[in-house]
Amino acid sequence: MARWSSPKDPALEAALRRNRRWVVNNQIKRLLLRFPSRTAPVRFLQSRFKTLDLMGRAANWLGKYPSCFEVFSADAEGGSGEQEPYFGFTKRMAALVDAEEAAVAASEPAMADRLARVLMLARGRRLQVSKLSALRGPLGLPDDYLLRLLPAHTDLFRLTNPYPHRRNAAELELIRWAPSLAVSAVEATAAANDSAPRFTCSLPASWTKSHAKMEEFNSTPYISPYSEEWAVPGTDAEAEKRAVAVAHEILSLTLWRKMSILKLEHFRREFGLPEDTARMLLRHPCLFYVSNRYKIHTVVLREGYEGSELREKDPVVAAKDRLGELMQEGLQEYNQRRRAANVEKKRRRGEIDVKKEEEKVEDEEAARLESAEKREERRRFYKVLFDDGNR
């Protein structure tokens, strides 16, 4: 079925912008962490290049990020006595990786709460482990989340296998209902404001039709996504009310307040979502922003953002942001070195006037700064546009 997107929102589109380089470097980081020494032969990375969707030489890629990775010679495996290139983290990168690991370890109680809430949203309070892997990234769960969380929360979770003869049939089950967790983000906000739970429109006041539709939607009582009543609601309106509450709550549980619609629909049966979840999300632009950036349909929880920035940053998100900043710094350093080397080569060959080339570089730097100022001005504009008073 054809899919559509919401009218473009530059601020939220910026929030969805992904830098493929950072994704690749994060994968390289995860590869290194598999080694106790946090070092590996460059040829090992080269053998994984195709799976990273990269071409060329691994050593050249590592050289582009001198602030993140260092290449050195060490004895080759096998005891031949020969030397071969290895790579590992720089001291700054290692410190940030450790900080990210510490943030993940410190957030384990919050992880357990998020996982319990997801299971409380699901029919039967259980989900297949193989399907849960689709939510691991959005929920900020590490690869070994089962080993981390289950031993410490035997009173809350258990693994079952109702179909031993089937592959990937293991399920994670919630064995204890936690009333303190069965409070949605909407209900928590209402309790803080001492008001009845209702959805909030996060569009500017000028979107009068959308505001009017949200008022009409709010005219019927809010249905908690944690309701233990799984009977089919009496009307289509009630069914949509609960489905919207479920989608809103799932997005509220994600670290980045966004998710691929394909992943969300993957749990349509378990969470009681409609057959065409994307169409339902588009019917509620006050709450959800649907984008087709990179040809991936993604839904963003509008109230989770102020302009292009998250309103609340989980410590794990903040740690990952610092890693991204270091990667950007390394790439800029590499580009400056390469530009300087090219200028020097041309100078030696007598192809350029060094003074003019330096002036050109200065002009490019001035243009870059001017562009950055314009971006900051746009950011401030959208910060005002989407200020709390207009939501």
Image: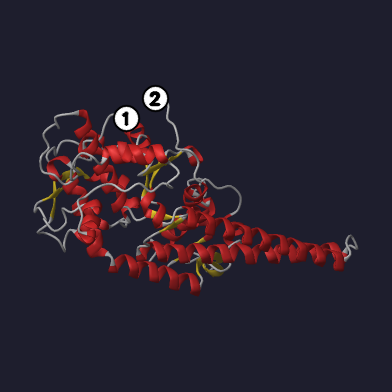
State the image quarter where residue 130 is shown: top left
* Location of residue 98 in the rendering, given as x and y in whole percent from the top left corner: 39, 71
Q: Is residue 196 left or right of residue 319?
A: left
State the image quarter where residue 163 is shown: top left
* Location of residue 353 in the rendering, given as x and y in whole percent from the top left corner: 89, 64
Asked if marks 2 and 1 touch (Cβ < 8 Å), the reply is: yes
Q: Residue at x 16, y 61 (%)?
A: 151
Residue 247, placed above or below residue 65: above
Mark 2, residues whose alpha carbon is within 10 Å: few (<14), some, or many (≥20)?
Answer: few
Q: Is residue 142 left or right of residue 128?
A: right
Element class at badge 1:
loop
* Location of residue 386 in the rendering, given as x and y in whole percent from the top left corner: 45, 53
Amino acid at dot 2 = Met
Q: Is residue 377 left or right of residue 167?
A: right
Q: Total of numbered circles in the picture? A: 2
Residue 186, placed above or below residue 77: above
Residue 166, placed above or below residue 364: above
* Location of residue 303 in the rendering, given as x and y in whole percent from the top left corner: 36, 52
Q: Residue at x 86, y 64 (%)?
A: 356
Q: Nearer the viewer, residue 78 or 363?
A: 363
Q: Nearer the viewer, residue 153 or 72?
A: 153
Element class at badge 2:
loop
Amino acid at dot 1 = Asp
Which part of the image, by quadrant, shows the N terminus? Answer: top left
**What residue sits right under mark 2 in the picture?**
1
Q: Residue furthest top?
A: 1
In the picture, the disc for residue 276 is 1
Mark 1, residues whose alpha carbon is within 10 Å: few (<14), some, or many (≥20)?
Answer: few
Q: Residue at x 18, y 42 (%)?
A: 221
Q: Nearer the viewer, residue 113 or 335?
A: 113
Q: Residue at x 19, y 51 (%)?
A: 196
